[in-house]
Amino acid sequence: MVFGREIILEVKNLSKVYDKEVLHIDHLALRRGRIYGIIGPSGAGKSTLLRLVNLLEPPSGGEIHFLGRPISMNGNVSRTDAARREMTLVFQKPLLFQTSVEENVAFGLKARRFTREEVRARVDILLGKVGMREFAGRHAGTLSGGEAQRVALARAVAFEPALLLLDEPTANLDPSNIELIERLILDLNRETAMTIVMVTHNIFQARRVAREVIFMHEGRVVETGETEKIFTSPEDPRTKAFVEGRMVY
Ligand SMILES: Nc1ncnc2c1ncn2[C@@H]1O[C@H](COP(=O)(O)OP(=O)(O)O)[C@@H](O)[C@H]1O
Ligand SMILES: [Mg+2]
């Protein structure tokens, strides 16, 4: 295993059919330790892809391999321990438990039999990272959108999952929260080997944060590549239209 080259997630012929097929990805591979930005117009299938990878919904067909093991084959999902523990999805609207900020972040840690002191210390570090230390005792229901999303992120990364999936995590936030969360994503990536996949409809955000960009359109991955290449010399005319803001949707 060479750091930065190891494939941690691979999908093949992955398909999702609702009334019609809304996703069909021939092949996509994500490497350990990288930040990927998934961009594409509304309805392109970005959220569907994250939901399938996170096993929230079964695919209609195809394969998903995670950390070298199949977790979904031909519509049959097998929720391996790795899939449960090593992958987290954060939504656009943060889902928090109706309890304190501290309890929210401690949740997963307690389940793993850390001592109380270990849990407390880890929660404190995590809240510090997201600038929420002084909110530790607050009830989650009293937080603003940006504060809640920061807590959701702290909870999601408490375990340093191998794969962090973010679905438009800053879509409803103000600029200062957006900046904080982008910085956190970059820090996490630098300090850990976490692979981060961020769906964003904001091409500027993808350019700021992602090392590689995946452009989706009408359920397909049209083009993937190093971020600067996608923005400066995309190969597909649809990618070019999208990054230049000319794609009508
Ligand atoms: N539960 C569902 N039932 C039927 N159609 C769905 C469902 N979820 C998503 N879709 C459709 O699948 C397509 C892709 O949606 P989505 O993955 O949410 O796109 P994106 O996140 O890129 O905006 C859209 O046409 C959407 O209407
Ligand atoms: Mg979406």
Image (tube, helix red, strand yellow):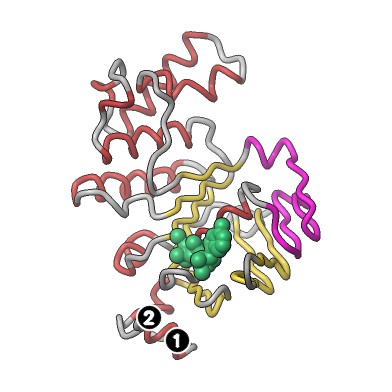
Task: Identify the element where label 2 is drawn.
Answer: helix
Q: Amino acid at mark 2?
A: Phe
Report which residue position mark 1 lands on.
Answer: 238
Q: Amino acid at mark 1?
A: Arg
Q: Which mark is residue 183?
A: none
Report which residue position mark 2 lands on.
Answer: 242
Number of marks in the image? 2
Tell me if residue 225 comes above or below residue 88 in the rendering.
below
Give the quarter of the figure containing the C terminus: bottom left
Q: Residue at x 48, y 88 (%)?
A: 235
Residue 239 on the magenta span: no
Q: Residues within 10 Å of mark 2 (few under 14, many from 20)?
A: many
Q: Residue furthest top?
A: 116
Q: Are marks 2 and 1 in contact (CB under 8 Å)?
A: yes
Query: Percent position (x, y) of residue 18?
Result: 63, 65
Q: Residue furthest front?
A: 19
Q: Residue at x 63, y 72 (%)?
A: 20
Tell me if residue 202 comes above or below residue 187 in the rendering.
below
Left or right: residue 113 versus residue 170 is: right
Tell me if residue 94 comes above or below residue 7 in the rendering.
above
In terms of depth relative to the viewer, which is nearer, 74 or 129? 74
Task: Identify the element where label 1 is drawn.
Answer: helix
Residue 78 on the magenta span: yes
Q: Choose top left, top right, bottom left or bottom right for residue 104.
A: top left
Q: Residue at x 27, y 40 (%)?
A: 145
Q: Magenta segment, which residues?
A: 58-85
In terms of depth relative to the viewer, which is nearer, 208 or 175? 175
Query: Percent position (x, y) of residue 205?
Result: 32, 62
The answer to whether one can see residue 33 in this image is yes
Query: Percent position (x, y) of residue 116?
Result: 50, 8
